Amino acid sequence: MGNICRSPSAEGFFARALSDSPYADRVSVDSAGTHGYHVGQPPDSRAVETAQGFGVDISGLRARKVSVEDFERFDLIVAMDHDNLADLKARQPANSKARLVSMMDYHPDPHPDEVPDPYYGGMTGFNYMCELLDAATRGLLEEVEGSLDG
């Protein structure tokens, strides 16, 4: 939503996984929110701290809002939850090349089916978010690599 918790964390986890991939130079990663609440701001300090505990540095990222250009720039746009996925689908231009998916489609466990927003909770929620994203972004990378192999 605001691009300060889940999305920048997902960007960081995916970028870390991608850094070891032979396709690292062929894939770009970015994050954006569906709302402009925090444009230009760094990620939530709790997200930064928790991601750092997983060896992921997101401190240099800044929030931005998804743009129409993103639907042309990216082949894949990954949403964290059902509401944001629906919002993205509603914004997607008819001629867009982007495929819209849910992050949890790439997690090895089918439940939960969305990444819970930890913003209004405590550090336990941020840790759980990072655990989910760590596994899901690895699954996402496997699909991306598979599509580049074919």
Image: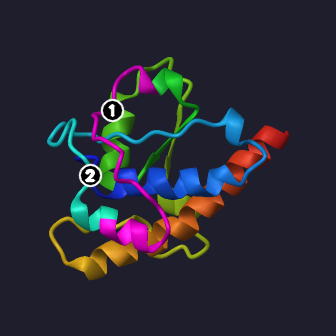
Q: Is residue 37 above or below residue 95?
A: below
Residue 3, magenta (yes or no): no
Circle 1 Cα neighbour tier, 10 Å, few/some/many (<14 / 14–19 / ≥20): some
Q: Is residue 63 above or below residue 73?
A: below
Circle 2 Cα neighbour tier, 10 Å, few/some/many (<14 / 14–19 / ≥20): many
Give whichever of discs 1 and 2 has the lower sequence position: 2
Q: Which residues are magenta?
A: 49-70
Q: Residue at x 18, y 75 (%)?
A: 121
Looking at the image, the residue that sits furthest to the top is: 95
Main SS type for the magenta part? loop
Query: Dot 1 corresponds to which residue?
Result: 66
Q: Nearer the viewer, residue 13 or 145?
A: 13
Which quadrant, please, contains the C terminus? top right
Q: Residue at x 57, y 69 (%)?
A: 135
Residue 127: horizontal and vertical position, in percent? 36, 77
Looking at the rendered structure, the kind of residue marked 1 is Val
Q: Residue at x 40, y 42 (%)?
A: 31
Q: Residue at x 18, y 36 (%)?
A: 36
Looking at the rendered structure, the kind of residue marked 2 is Ile
**Closer to the eye: label 1 or 2:** 2
Lateral position of residue 2 relative to residue 69, left or right: left
Q: Quadrant of residue 81?
A: bottom left
Q: Nearer the viewer, residue 106 or 119?
A: 119
- Give the CA separation, mark 1 to mark 2: 13 Å
Q: Is residue 67 above or below residue 106?
A: above
Residue 58, magenta (yes or no): yes
Lateral position of residue 117 relative to residue 78, left or right: left
Q: What label sits on residue 4 in the rendered view?
A: 2
Residue 47: horizontal and vertical position, in percent? 30, 64
Residue 92: horizontal and vertical position, in percent? 40, 28
Where disc 1 sits, the SS reads loop
